Structure formats: structure tokens, C-alpha cells
Image: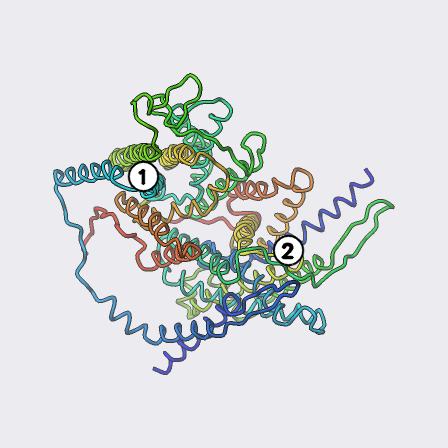
Amino acid sequence: MFSRVKTALFAAIIAGVIIAPVFGLQITRVGMATTIVPEWNMIFRGMAIVFVFHLIRPYLAKFIFKPKAKFTAPVMGDKGRKALTFLLIAIALIWPFFSGRSQVDIATLVLIYVMLGLGLNIVVGYAGLLDLGFVGFYAVGAYTYALMYHWLGLGFWWALPCAGIMAGIFGYILGFPVLRLRGDYLAIVTLGFGEIIRLLLINLYDFTGGPDGISGIPKPTVFGFPMARRAPEGETTFHDLMGWSFNNQDVVIYLYMLALVLALITLFVSNRLIRMPVGRAWEALREDEIACRSLGLNPTGIKLSAFTIGATFAGFGGAFFAARQGIVNPESFGFIESALILAIVVLGGMGSQIGVILAAILLTVVPEIARGFAEYRMLVFGLVMVLMMVWRPQGLMPVKRPTVELKA
Amino acid sequence: MSDLLPQLIQQFFNGLSLGAIYALIAIGYTMVYGIIGMINFAHGEIYMIGAYAGLVTLSVIGVSSGLPLALVILIMLLVAAAITAAYGYAVEKIAYAPLRGSPRLVPLISAIGMSIFLQNWVAIGQGARDMAVPALVTGAVQIPFGDAFVVNAPYSRIMIIVVTVVLMVALSFYIKYSRMGRASRACSQDLRMANLLGIDTSRVISFTFVIGAMLAAVGGVLIALAIGKLNPYIGFLAGIKAFTAAVLGGIGSIPGAMLGGVLLGLAETFAAAYISSQYKDIVAFGLLVLILLFRPTGLLGKPEVQKV
């Protein structure tokens, strides 16, 4: 008991030292003079909480982490799963017509993150390559559309495939030299690439518009008919064609539908890829690289394919993002964005598609609801990443991997 | 033509003082990597917190307290080091210690989360805006070259170099001759074997984090005094660059971190002066990518042997 009090006291003192310079003693400027506003309450309250927590931790651990019955998802047959999937898709298709504009807008954002999450899931979840520069490919996709519109006057439907191909090419070129590096070095190099792409976008002022970016990017057309109040000369708007009156809600729903289609394509493709030989090879490589090599698989080629395909999906996502925002600038493609996409994959459970979708919804919708606590958003986000790694590194919805155990 | 030499000397001096800061931070990366083989992504944030702790201490003392300047700076450095020591210790215990023995990517993701957390922790506590640091050390040594050009060496930058050199020498002796230093060298050779031989490895790991954090805090305080402002987001870039320095010198090697820091500082300063100041970050990142591609073991590092 005495030693426990001692450790608790020690922890409380450490906590006091940690809280004091940041929250306890706040620097405020009054005119020219800088003064310190001490908040002793904050410090002592923090210390007390840590002290008590440390004292009761052993009991807490016994209390909470009782060996409880293992939760297993109900197993459905193929038919049931198919029916459920169709039901969900049908709901996703119908609900925007009965919902508000801002909800549909948020749902569109969720779908962009689903797309990005599924793309990164291929790289991180399936192939086990930690890519911290994923947002770079997203930026390449967004800027491909923005630049193609700005310099060549091409529309979304021309730019979409180009954005995917361009991001894929970037993934291939950047991936080629780095993929023989070991896990954590790979992470740092991809982070470096992501930052280089962003810095280039800022500094190539004449080409990319620098920090201001490119604005006035048009929304996607519907089979060549623009979805806007007024069409450019010589074109008919979609609502004129259909004989409707213009409604902003229609545009939002149209964008949502597009995002849904893109996300479903991503889901379908990645779902199929993982069952193909190349998908099997990704997983094998993730589990044991040396064993793979001795079985005659070429690690570089296999990793490169994962990297390129992941980047391609990021490129599609980026082009759609540019079309939705109407403006791109380098601000949107910082490291935090990469960390957010990574958090979606990690939180969902690496390699689990349904997990990625749930995590994308969670990480996009919760901050929107808790707008009043906006400044705490990133704080909590960082904390959740740490706690997830400590308590549940396999994610919310871990994939059940077929395993064979040898019994001695 | 006559200006070329003094200009080079001026850039060399600037690069050296910048590189000294990188070296101070890089030691934290390299020592942690040497012992437990993980990239402590939150280390840049510790440096930022060190700078804040120094500023808070200075504000508590007061700019015009009448105490001798050297004493004020010494107190700032000591308090900042003590506070970041607590941070380093706590970060290790909370975010990394429970993950020992898990796959390599798990602690890295945890470290990224910790880095985001600490950044916003300070941004909420002390405000996210730029904060002015009073210029304590003013004036400069001016060395005239010929009749036109003067090499300008501010005292604050000279202080960076002097303090860094003193600390590096002290650290080298400490690692070489003290009991703890010997234990940490043993752990970096073989953690499990050291444990079997009776070394308290978890204490050594804590010690490594604490030493790294204290050195980073010194770097933070010194650069804040030299530049005169700071914000909660300075840690990210400085951290990545210091990591580059550690990799450049050979990660795991302490002299390598010092060498790498100085080289990176020089490369960045010369790139800013002779290419374009907007591209200096690209030069640093480009250097990182190139080293990892062509010489992942760095200049002074030992190659890592992969065993089945």
C-alpha cells in the first residue's frame, strides 16, 4: 500500500510539472507588458486526479477488464450479406431526398474520406506499408483537375481519369526507389514526399497559383449539361433541359450521388483486389517478407502495385474534392490530413473495409456535431490515436484472419 | 569577388548555429532509436514545449528583474530542461512503454498521435498565435573584412554554438564514463542481453527519453531567444529536420547526430542563400529522401543485419 501511495505521489508531481507551464501559468500580454496569470486550481485539480487515478488503478483494472465473453459478429451467409449490402446502398441512395442540405453535404464529405480511407487501406492495411504522405497523391489528383481546367479548360469528366492516372504515376515514380526501405524509414520518406509536393505547390507560383491556389473550378456536368444556375454561352443547363427550376439542393444531392458512386467503385475494386493473386501476395508480404522472397515473390513489384493503386484512388478522391470545393490550395493538403486518413484506417482496423467506412463516418460526423468543442477536436484526436494503439491496436472492427496454429 | 569569402564565412556561421540546434534535437532521436529502435515522432513537440517553458520561466522572473543576465538564462535553461524531462518521462510511460514488443508501426502511430496531442495541448493552453520572446541577448560581434563587408555574429547565436559544444562534450563524457552511460551503451548493443545481465532496462529507456528531452529543451530555449518568437507548431518542422540530421549522421550514433545536425544546418543555410530561401525546406526534405535511398545507415552508422 505504501509503495502504491509513493508511485501515485510521484505521478502527481510529474503531472503538476506537466500542467504548470502550459495551463497553470498562462502568458498574457497587457499592452506592452507580458504577465503571468497563475491558475493554481487547474494545477492542483490535475494533480489530484492523477493521484487518485494511480491509487485506484489496480482495482480499476480488475473491475473493467474482466474476462468477458468474446464479442463475435453474427456470421451471415452469402445471401444475407448481399441482401444487407443492397439494402444499405438503397438507403444511401434514397435518404438525401428526404434530408436537409447540410446533412447531405456532410455525407458527401464522409464519402470522400471513405474513398481516401479505402485507398490508404490498400497500402497500409493490406500491404502493411505505412504511408504518411498519402495526402500528396490526393493533392496531385485535386491539382490535376484544377490545372487542367485552368490551363486547358477541360471539364471534370476529362480530368477524373487523368487525375487518377496522374496520381498513380506519381505513386509509381515515388514508390519505385523507396519501397526497398524498412517500415519506419518508409513512413518518414513518404512523409518527406508529401511535404515536398505541398511545398512545390506553394512555390511554383506561376503554375499553381502559390498559396492562393486555384479558384472557380466548375462542378461536374451531367452528361455534358452543367449543373448551375446559368450555363456558359452555347450550352444548356441541366435544369433547363429537364424543364425544372434551378434548386441548389439538387446540386448538393448530385454531388453526393457522384461521391457515392465513386466510393462504391473504390469499395468494389478493393474488395475484389484482395481476393486476386496480387491481393494475396500483399497480405503474405505484410506477414513475412523473407518467407515471401524465398517463395519466389518479388517484394518490390508487389509493394509497388499496392502503392500505385492506393495513390490512384487518392487521385480520384482529389479530383472530386476539387470539384466539390470549387477551390484548391496547398493548405488543404498538410500532414494533419494524412494523419486523419491514417487514423481512419487505424481506427477502423487495418485491412477491414467495413471498419474503414465506420471510422470515416465517426471521424467526420463527430467533429461536425461537436462544433462547440472545435478547438479540442485535434487534442482528442491525438489522444484517441495513442489510446487505440495502447488498448486496441487491431482497431474497432478487426479483420478475422484465417490462422493455423500448431499445437505442440 | 572580394565579397565572396566574407559572405561564405557569414553563411557558415549562420549554418553552424542552426546546425547546433538540429544537433541538440537529433540526439534525442538517435538515442531513443539506438536503444528501442523506434522513431519518437513526438520529440519535435518536446522541443517546442521546452521553448515555451523557457518563456514562461522568463515571464515569471520578469525581464527587468535586476538579476545578472547569465543567471537568468541559466535558470531558464534549467527549468525548461526539468519540465521537458517530466514530459519525456511521461510520454514514454503513457504512449510507448505499454507497446513494447509490438510490431514496429504500432509505436510509430502512437507517437504521431502523441505529437498531435502535444501540439494542441500547448495551442489550447497558451494560445495558438505567435508569441514574442523578449530579446535578452542583444548586440553582435562584427568582424570587418576588407573595407566593404562585415561579418555579423550576434551574441545570441554565439551562445547557441558555445552551449551546444559544452553540452555535447559533457554528454560524450557522461555516456562514456558514468554507470548510466555504460548501461545505456550496453542496451543499445543488445537490449535483451543487457536485461539478462541485470541492467534495469526500463530505467535506461526512461533515462534516454529524459536526456533527449532535456537537450531538445535547451535547443528550444536558445533558438527562441535568438529568433524572438515561437508558436505551438514549430516542433513539427524542426522535428522532421532533426530526424533528417540523425539519419544523415547514422541513426543510433551520437557523434553522428552532432555531425548530421551541423551538416544539415550548413546545407540549409547555403541553399537559402544561393538557391532560394523558399526552397530551403525542400532541400532538407530532399536530403532526407536521398540519404535514406542511397545510404540508409548514414555517415557514421553501422549497417543493420537482418536475421531470420
Residue farthest to the front, as pictured: A245
Q: Which residue occupies the foreground of this view, B76 or A49?
A: A49
Quadrant for residue B68, please give it: bottom right
Residue B220 coordinates in the image, percent (x, y): 59, 59
**Chain hosting mark 1:** A
Give how far apart the Cα atoms at labels 2 and 1 are: 43 Å
Residue A224 coordinates in the image, percent (x, y): 36, 21
Residue farthest to the right, as pictured: B147
Location of the N terminus of chain B by quadrant is: top right
**Chain hosting mark 2:** B
Q: Which residue occupies the foreground of this view, B127 or B188?
A: B127
Q: Which residue is mark 2?
A: B20
* Figure label count: 2
Circle 2 or circle 1, nearest the eye:
2
Q: Is residue A188 above or below residue B48?
A: above
Q: Examine the rendering and report whether any part of residue A124 can be seen.
A: yes
Residue drawn at 36 percent across, 62 percent down: B98
Q: Which residue is mark 1?
A: A282
Is A86 positioned to the left or the right of A193 in the image?
A: left
Residue B297 coordinates in the image, percent (x, y): 51, 47
